[in-house]
Amino acid sequence: MKIQRTALGIACLLIPATSFAVDMTTEILAQKGLITLEEYEKIRKAQSTQATVDTTEGLKFITADKSFSAQIGTMLQLDMASYDSDIKDSAGRDISNAGSEFRRVRLSMNGTFLTDWDYKTEIDFANSSQLIDGFVTSRGLQPVQLTFGHFKIPFSQESLAADKGLTFMERSLPNAFLNARAPGAMISAGKDHWSSAFMVFGEQLSSTAAAVSDEGGGASARFTWAPWVGPGANLHLGAAASLRVPSQNSTSLATTPVTYTEAVRLRAKPESNIIETRLIDTGNIIDVDKTQLWGLELGGSIKSVGFNAEYINTTIQRDKGRSDLEFSGWFAQTSWAITGEQRTYKGDKGLYDGLKPAKSVGQGGSGAWEIAARISELDLSDGALQLRNNKWLPEINGGKERNATFALNWYPNAYLRTSLNYVHVMDIEGGSYDDKDLNALQLRMQVAF
């Protein structure tokens, strides 16, 4: 028995410290000689196959060999807004009022299977059950990754950023050029200082999409480079290009029968989602052959100060002798974490994460506090001048809008966030709301993990 106990003691010393935490009770019984070495080994092996639970970033289940994992996530965003404006909607109603909505109500599951494969499924219940993400990624050829399913198109850092980590409640005006997600396949790669991605995709999934006789699609590529990545500061540069062929859908023309033709429509809300009115809108642009986009990105941070800027150019090429159209938009923003936190930069993705408080409320801190300002512009007017209503107007008189947005964000902990935004429409040139004014004060309460 003495020899057996000695051998058992040596075996226990060779067991990793993590195993001690798992089967401490069993080990004590073995050391006291209440169970044999063989019995102890059988129990330890059985325990080593059990899954563990990780709650550092939500609720995550991991098998002992780490080849399978599943993390349950959720995001709830409740928005409230009040408007001050001299604008009336299409029905002639005054929009100077208040409103509220659940902006996002999402449930997700993501994880790993067979060690080198990742997956994610996310559904939004805010308006109707809508698939947000549903994809699988292979990491077996690192640093190259292969992804297929329904996910974000690689174009624009602001568009690719996670919804829960955006500096402002809504993305900037130029985001109107983009369809954030689509079904397709992508090859990507990246390291600490660079990232690249190329995707071919089909038409964006939508529960309200009209039937089409010929579905559109396209391709998109993005490359980023970070010449400077350090603990105190970083610098990000990026470029992207995309080509899209539109679907053939009804343009609601006054013809019998209904004419089906390739069409594109660009429009934008004034960086506030509750309002239904789009202040600039091209209407249906018909006989479109293809749409080409290119964009440039600039970003960085110096300790607790961050900045980002983007420019997007869109060219619509038309057939049947119609001239091409060109639209553009840009934004520039800066933010300051008053409590000293710095944004995390993922060089292999070319993306910034949202702030995480250094000291959470209830743990000796006040959470993270952040202030931010942004100017954005979108121009949706182009084409040959035409005389309409005794005015010379461009063929596509969608309008040009410039906004200034200010934000105050509070992060009590890694899961909770409160945001207060003030949006001021600085100027509207052309379109249906030429020279009109609008101001919005909006509040968001968010829980996400």
Image (cartoon, rainbow, N blue to C red):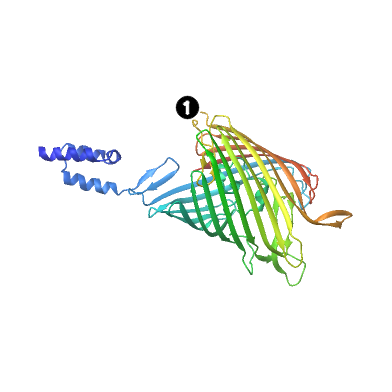
- Foreground of the two, 79 or 369: 369
- Residue 290 occupies which quadrant of the picture? bottom right
Residue type beneath disc 1: Gly
Q: Is residue 29 visible?
A: yes
Q: Which residue bears the numbered disc 1?
A: 364
Report the residue that reaches farthest toward the top.
364
Residue 125 x/y as whole percent: 55, 52
Residue 275 x/y as whole percent: 69, 47
Report the residue that reaches farthest toward the right.
390
- Foreground of the two, 294 or 40: 294
Left or right placement of residue 49 versus residue 138 in this view: left
Left or right placement of residue 351 versus residue 398 in this view: left
Q: Label 1 crowding class (10 Å Cα cut-off): few <14, some 14-19, many 20+?
A: few
- Foreground of the two, 114 or 229: 229
Q: Is residue 291 above or below residue 97?
A: below
Residue 320 x/y as whole percent: 75, 68
Is the N terminus in the top left, top right, bottom left or bottom right quadrant?
Answer: top left
Left or right placement of residue 437 versus residue 361 in this view: right
Q: Is residue 396 visible?
A: no
Label 1, secondary structure: give it.
loop
Left or right placement of residue 438 versus residue 126 in this view: right
Report the residue that reaches farthest toward the front.
227
Q: Is residue 359 above or below residue 33?
A: above
Residue 312 x/y as whole percent: 66, 49
